[in-house]
Amino acid sequence: MKSVKLTNCDLDASEISLGCMRISEMTNQEISTLIHTALDEGINFFDHADIYGGGKSEAKFAEALGMTPQLREKMLIQTKCGIRKGSFDFSKAHILNAVDGSLKRLQTDYIDVLLLHRPDALVEPEEVAEAFTILQDSGKVKYFGVSNQNPMQIELLKKFVKQPIIFNQLQFSITNTTMIDAGINVNMEIDPSVDRDGSILDYCRLHDITIQPWSPFQYGFFEGVFLDNDKFPELNAKINEIAAAKGVTNTTIAIAWILRHPAHMQPIIGTTNPQRVKDSCKASGLPFTREEWYEIYRAAGNKLP
Ligand SMILES: NC(=O)c1ccc[n+]([C@@H]2O[C@H](COP(=O)([O-])OP(=O)(O)OC[C@H]3O[C@@H](n4cnc5c(N)ncnc54)[C@H](OP(=O)(O)O)[C@@H]3O)[C@@H](O)[C@H]2O)c1
């Protein structure tokens, strides 16, 4: 497993991360097998959020592993805060409270990376800055990032926050490519030309912010998996053809396609199936040509101008 290229921090993180959003209803044995499979495959980066499973995902993660300081040192743990029932909350008090809750549930005294989960319309960046500094100075959080934010939202934070923003977690998959479409169709009178995110992909590359694509196997907003799905016959035919030629599964190709992008993204896979974790990890270092990348992009229904 390769490491993801990161600037502005000293983390040595695997280029594929395991997301823990879906583990809350699993048994301890299943969770332990899943996480140990990931570790054996070279994944050392685990993504959480205070709200996953209403807090159960973080708690069961630590409980199932019987978290020890030795095991904790082998992993990098990221969690997120800022989503509440019916509102978003980036206030200083909420950020500080949320981190204390996550630390307790995860049975650890530090978080490697804290992300602000979804933009809060009422954000007061001065308060975020105060919270980040308290968390960093106390050793509770090492690094900071955001999720689902556009360039101007990040610029606003950066006016006050002194720590570097190292990650932006965004939805991106073969069937969810708005980040890329607008750049390919600049200034055209067609829907893919619409810049929905303020050119976040180029902004992140310019500012050394690593994009973490979430839901790499889903289409729509959690509508389902596009692999082996009758709704995407042409796409699956192309993915399966390339998978067969490389001797890997379609799961591997879905991740390899993301890793082929030169922005050095770190996909967050959400499978709870150990075999799919192994298949996903085969994407790291898999040769993938420019032609193959564009063939899949076109097979997903995208037209080149
Ligand atoms: N920042 C945000 O706003 C945000 C939003 C959503 C998610 N996330 C993060 O991103 C992570 C991934 O999200 P996700 O779970 O929605 O993404 P995903 O990896 O695209 O989807 C995983 C789901 O697809 C299923 N699946 C079925 N067939 C599959 C196949 N062939 N290959 C792979 N998966 C298959 C999995 O089932 P099995 O478990 O049976 O394999 C699982 O239920 C989350 O855990 C979370 O950490 C962040």
Image (tube, rainbow, N blue to C red):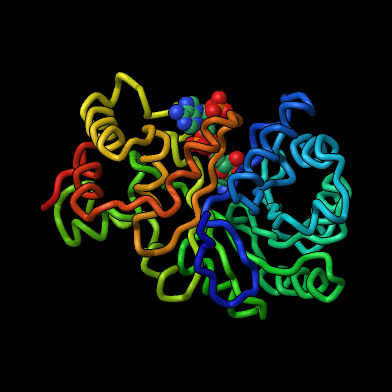
* Place of residue 32 in the rendered image (x, y in percent of width and height, measured from the top left): 75, 34
Q: Relative to the observer, which residue lies in front, 38 or 210?
A: 38
* Place of residue 260 in the rendered image (x, y in percent of width and height, measured from the top left): 34, 55
131 to 46, vertically: above or below: below
Residue at image coords 66%, 34%: 34
Total marks in image: 0
* Place of residue 217 in the rendered image (x, y in percent of width and height, measured from the top left): 44, 36
- Image check: 247 left or right of 282? left
Residue 248 placement: quadrant:
top left
- Image check: 116 left or right of 65? left
Residue 187 visible to the viewer: yes
Residue at image coords 37%, 50%: 286
Residue 223 visible to the viewer: no
124 to 34, vertically: above or below: below
Residue 206 placement: quadrant:
bottom left
Q: Relative to the observer, which residue lies in front, 284 or 97?
A: 284
Residue at image coords 51%, 59%: 2
172 to 162, vertically: above or below: above
- Image check: 6 left or right of 54? left
Residue farthest toward the top in the current orientation of the protein? 230
Q: Relative to the observer, which residue lies in front, 37 or 211?
A: 37
Residue at image coords 31%, 57%: 195
* Place of residue 196 in the rendered image (x, y in percent of width and height, measured from the top left): 36, 54
